[in-house]
Amino acid sequence: MVMHTIGAESFTGVLASALERMAFVICDPCDETPGEVMAKSIAHAVVGATGPVAVKLCVSATAGLVGEVASGMLGIDSEDLDVDEHARAVVTELANIFGGELVMKMTEGEEGMVLSLPQEVGDDEAGALLDRVDAGGFAICLGTDTGQLLVTVVRG
Amino acid sequence: MNYRILIVDDSPLLRATARRAVLQAGASAENVREAQNGKEALDALSKEPADIVLLDINMPVMDGYQFVEEKARRPELAATRVALVTTEGNKKRLARMTELGVEHYLRKPFEPEDLRALVGVMFEGK
């Protein structure tokens, strides 16, 4: 059975690569704490993966990051975007893509893990998942010049 | 080009990205339609056929697997070719999709150029 353990160090590059490929957004690890990025985020989405193990992945994004991703994917200038209009679509699609990447890194496509539909969640639920990181999981903060992204991964 | 393309994805961002890619690959805007899930896609195909379906898997109402299984039961849709554009990476499930007639597979995250190339290959194969 193939089932790799994934940590923040190995997953950070996966997230940065996915953002660059899909949206031409170049991200680096940022100096803000997960709590600080969470507080500035305008939308959150959660996706679950179930199978031999169960994990949840939450994406939280600030307005600047939402604008950059939407701009990159839609091919229009970020100044012409209504960020609030695209926030839900951005975080849910990022959760879907990052969740798929997490499952692939864990299983190499061999095990029967199933990804749920991504769901937008509120500040309270996203914060509760971040609080569970110490019990088994990790949080990654990525940033650009204009925005930040928080990805929280926990068991269960 | 006059190929009729149906983009099936619950994400409006992905549908917009795919639409840009197929237009850049040479499709005509009036020949590109969109659906948010497999059921909408089947409804759209029953009204007007498509040559190519770009299909996500993880969708509400009717997912990509259910769509492909249902399409395989409908001989009138046999000429419609399907490419998966999805986060799915499970080898067994993808092999099952191939058995049911799916011809191509592009895994998210992809670069827009990857999708343009995929559509180009499918155009050439028509």
Image (cartoon, coloured by chain):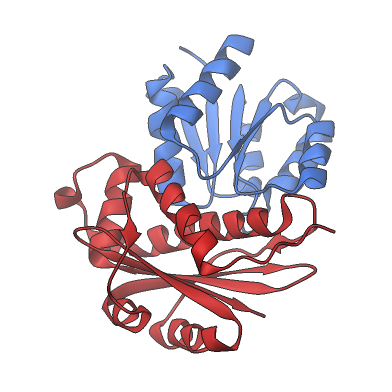
Looking at the image, is A90 positioned above or below residue B84?
Answer: below
For residue B59, what is the image quadrant?
Answer: bottom right
For the C terminus of chain A, the quadrant is bottom right
Q: Can residue A53 be seen in this view?
A: yes
Q: In this view, does A146 lie to the left or right of A49?
A: left
Q: Residue at x 72, y 61 (%)?
A: A114
Above-or-below relation of A107 to B104: below
Viewer-nearest residue: A102 or A90: A102
| Residue in view at x 31 percent, y 49 percent | A26
B79 w.r.t. A103: above or below: above
Residue B41 lies in quadrant: top right
Q: In this picture, is A6 found above or below A124?
A: above
Chain B tint as drawn: blue
Is residue A86 visible from the viewing direction of this image?
no
Q: The red chain is which one?
A: A
Residue shown at 49%/29% (left/top)?
B114
x and y percentages locating residue A146 in the rendered image: 19, 60
